[in-house]
Amino acid sequence: MRSSLKLLAAVNPTRSSKLRKPTISLDHFIQRQRVIALWREIVRALNKIPNSPTRSELRDYARQEFERHRNVTDLQHIRYLISTGKSEFDMMRRYIDEQAA
């Protein structure tokens, strides 16, 4: 038997791989998509501000908040964070619109 076939034969398909991510529920998937959409909306809005220290500070703040809550898995808490993030972003958007004008 060729060495590559021996290697494939030795792999146990029922054993979980360290490289494979755990599957998530549909609710978690939907919330993840909402988080990603919020992040993209924030980044697009920040790109409207001319390149300045303010733009960098706002982007750093947003990134730190997303990173700080990266490992939250409770759906209620995720929904709360999305809601809070959207309300904070709405306040920030008013400032951004003033800066871009």
Image (spheres, rainbow, N blue to C red):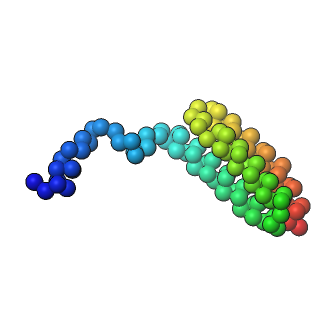
Find the residue positioned furthest to the front.
3
Question: Considering the image in quadrants, where does the C terminus appear?
Answer: bottom right
Q: Position of residue 42 (x, y in %)?
A: 72, 55
In the visual, does 47 lie left or right of 52? left
- What residue is drawn where x is 52% and y is 44%? 29
In the visual, does 40 lie left or right of 28? right
In this rendering, the answer to whether 6 lies above or below 25 is below
Could you say which is closer to the camera, residue 37 or residue 2?
A: 2
Q: How many numbered discs, if any?
A: 0
Q: Position of residue 64 (x, y in %)?
A: 71, 46
Could you say which is closer to the camera, residue 50 or residue 84?
A: 50
- What residue is drawn where x is 71% and y is 58%? 43
Q: Position of residue 48 (x, y in %)?
A: 78, 66
- What residue is drawn where x is 79% and y is 45%? 88
- What residue is drawn where x is 80% and y is 66%? 51
Question: Considering the image in quadrants, where does the N terminus appear?
Answer: bottom left
In the visual, does 17 lie left or right of 47? left
Find the residue positioned furthest to the left.
1
Q: Position of residue 93 (x, y in %)?
A: 81, 55
